[in-house]
Amino acid sequence: MGRVNFGGIVKDVCLAYVPEIAVGDYTIVHVGFALSKIDEESAQKTLETFREMGLLDEEFGEPEAVETVKETT
Amino acid sequence: MPETKKPDLSNWSCPLPLQDYPAIVMGHGGGGKLSSELVEHLFLPAFRNETLANLGDAAVIGPLSGRIAMSTDTFVVQPLFFPGGNIGDLAVNGTVNDLAMSGARPRYLTAGFVLEEGFQITDLARIVESMAASARAAGVEIVTGDTKVVERGHGDGCYINTAGIGVIPDHVNVGPSLVQPGDAVIVSGTIADHGMAIMSVREGLEFDSTIVSDCAALNELAAIVLEAGGASVHAMRDPTRGGLGATMHEIAHASNVGMVIEESQLPVRPEVQAACELLGLDPLFVANEGKIAVFVAAEAAGRVLEAMRSHPLGSNAAIIGQAVAQHPKMLVAHTRIGANRVIPAQIGEQLPRIC
Amino acid sequence: MKYLTEFRDGELASKLAREIRQIVTRPWNIMEVCGGQTHSIIRNGIDQLLPEGVQMIHGPGCPVCVTPLEVIDRALAIAAQPGVIFCSFGDMLRVPGSAKDLFRVKSEGGDVRIVYSPLDAVNLAIKNPDKEVVFFGVGFETTAPANAMALHIARRQSLHNFSMLISHVLVPPAIEAIMESDENKVQAFLAAGHVCSVMGYWQYPPIAEKYRVPIVVTGFEPLDIMEGLRRVLLQLERGESRVDNAYERVVTHDGNREAQRLLAEVFDVCDRAWRGIGVIPQSGWRLSEAYREFDAEHRFAVSDIHAVESPLCHSGEVLRGALKPNECPAFGKECTPRHPLGATMVSSEGACAAYYNYGRFLSVEELVHA
């Protein structure tokens, strides 16, 4: 068993399935079990791909059809 | 963790007789000597006020002038003690808040206890002391009460009923059916704190966190809202059981308006959000015990928001949405990714999800 | 929370939505298999950001929905027995059996408890040696490692008062069953990321090839789902049918070897009935010979309990994607979240409840102008 911090709350979690895990690593937890260590490099890479996506046609992209609540302050 | 409130033994005229029985026995509810000892050595010194001290069959109060608001609520929370408070704090603040949400200045409360045989007197003392402290903080007096004892196994240690009355100032007129399309919805602070504090100590689901109940008396903050907003304040509610979501559903039905929630504006503590996700709960439907949802005409919303933020209980207040003429009786959220979703009412209590 | 919050970014979601709109030239039907993904799609309104004609079909990936009626009835029978502490994940409590649900059994005196993990049930068994503690072991490959470990510990500690009522189901055979169906409309799948974190995704290429259907391993946050959709739509438009992994930060080709090892020890593959669908060959797990003594079904002799599902309920067709919830004659009439006929109306993730609750039988525009 190990202690896993979920953004500020801590729970005992079974780490038996992720023997490679070390303090400071991120993991996916399901019903009290760590199932997979998060590959942080891959996560960053994915986010980077999203950020770079459509950079070329950004200027000519269609306007967003998103409404927001009018702030009354 | 906040410090737990200890019973203030120095206030008791003579605690010794109570210690003959460290736990509640059937006789404590029997109306005899044990009953009066409980009153004399526990309730009277803790709640201390002249009306209660008369020990009549009924408390005689007043005269009061103006419209009188009256409310009652029963408290059965488990566990009785939780991070940030106990059932006693809830019992007093709950009724104080119900009165305050009707625009009233809460004045007098009653307290009825159902105790289980075997309940520890020291635990009862902690609860009673919390009630006394909460009543003092809210400026109300507990003027009459009752105690019954049920056999072991027939109760969860301690149940409390409180009823209260307050006086509504002449110019105040708020109610759940008075909300108008265009009204802004302001919530006085972070949501779901109380419900998740309880979850964190519930057997089978428990986790370690710094989450504490937001249990507090809201009468001062409610008075500030009414002062700043005047007649522009159309409704106030404390979103307790069922959370802000249930409250907004109720108001939408009562006033026949639609509600729009801007999800990105909902104040939720990160650790509360994390706990909700861990258990598969929606913070919108998790209980609060120290928050107000204010429904106020748009032009006064800024003023009211600013006034609320000047009070410690309103420092995280935010405008989270508005009432609209479209889709009456329905809640629609603008999600963080810019879509809309209808938020259905919950059928029962939210259940932790498997995935 | 790190690696969650970043994948909910509204601006990046708009970018992905724009990319998707640029890819799509015609209508497509895509099934997300996992109930968790269904929840995320509805909760965030992801389907509203998709171009017209791109339909999400909510698949049979919610354990609450697919656990057969008779297994629920068996659970109710066990939970009602004196001396039993019956433990379950929260959302199973409201699933209706033939006559009642677990809440009702609890109100009638059954000791029914919600737990977060099967290990909590094991601990209850240790703390209550004079009680029989039963855990309701439902779910897909994601939940199975937890149940396997709980059983492994119980066996190692000779916990004779612990058992499990097992109704485990497997994703790949369900995907094949859907593709085999005559009424099938599904043209591509988002495979369940967390199932694949355990099992890997090496099982999928033969399926993709056999049925010419693209399969993309996909996560649960809004950006994950949109990226899964983007990749699947790219393949559809190009006429490709490959297996792709859009959840690389969590899922590897081989999956979790440690978990697979214990799963193979604790469970045997078996035929399994799916609620509303019927028996799918080799689509479930039962306890292996070595663990048979922990099978609650045998310990409490409930194997004889059989049940007949309501003839009004078309949840099977809904789960296969052959029928939309609002096309069912009972939808919103005999069948509502308050009085559900089938489990797709019970679970908050169930396709029918989602349609009912979130007003998806009307578009938001219709609602707004109603």
Image (cartoon, rainbow, N blue to C red):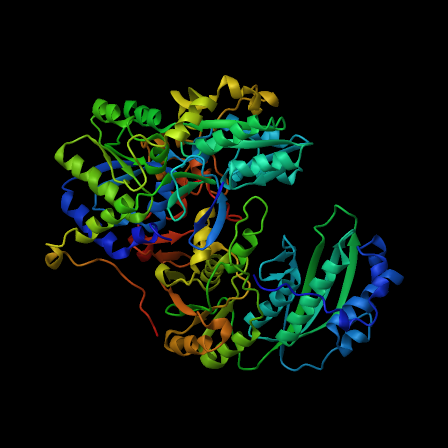
Q: Is residue B209 above or below residue C110?
A: below
Residue B30 appears left or right of C11: right
Q: In the depicted view, which residue is nearer to us: B164 or B234?
A: B164
Q: Which percent across, then down, holds residue C154?
A: 56, 29
Q: Residue at x 27, y 27 (%)?
A: C204
Regarding residue A55, the answer to whether it shows in the image is yes
Q: Residue at x 41, y 31 (%)?
A: C140
Name the residue furthest top.
C289
Q: Which percent across, then down, holds residue B239?
A: 51, 62
Q: Is residue A24 above or below residue B37?
A: above
Residue C216 appears left or right of B135: left
- Rendering quarter of residue B52: bottom right
Regarding residue B345, the answer to whether it shows in the image is no
Q: In the depicted view, which residue is nearer to us: C219 or B349?
A: C219
Q: Is residue B13 above or below residue B150?
A: below
Could you tell me which quadrant the C terminus of chain C lies in? bottom left
Q: Is residue C194 above or below residue C152?
A: below
Q: Which percent across, then down, holds residue B177?
A: 49, 66
- Rendering quarter of residue A17: top left
Q: In the depicted view, which residue is nearer to us: C267 or C355?
A: C267
Q: In the depicted view, which residue is nearer to us: B258 or B60?
A: B60
Q: Which percent across, then down, holds residue B143?
A: 74, 72
Q: How many labels were placed on the picture?
A: 0
Q: Residue at x 48, y 40 (%)?
A: A32
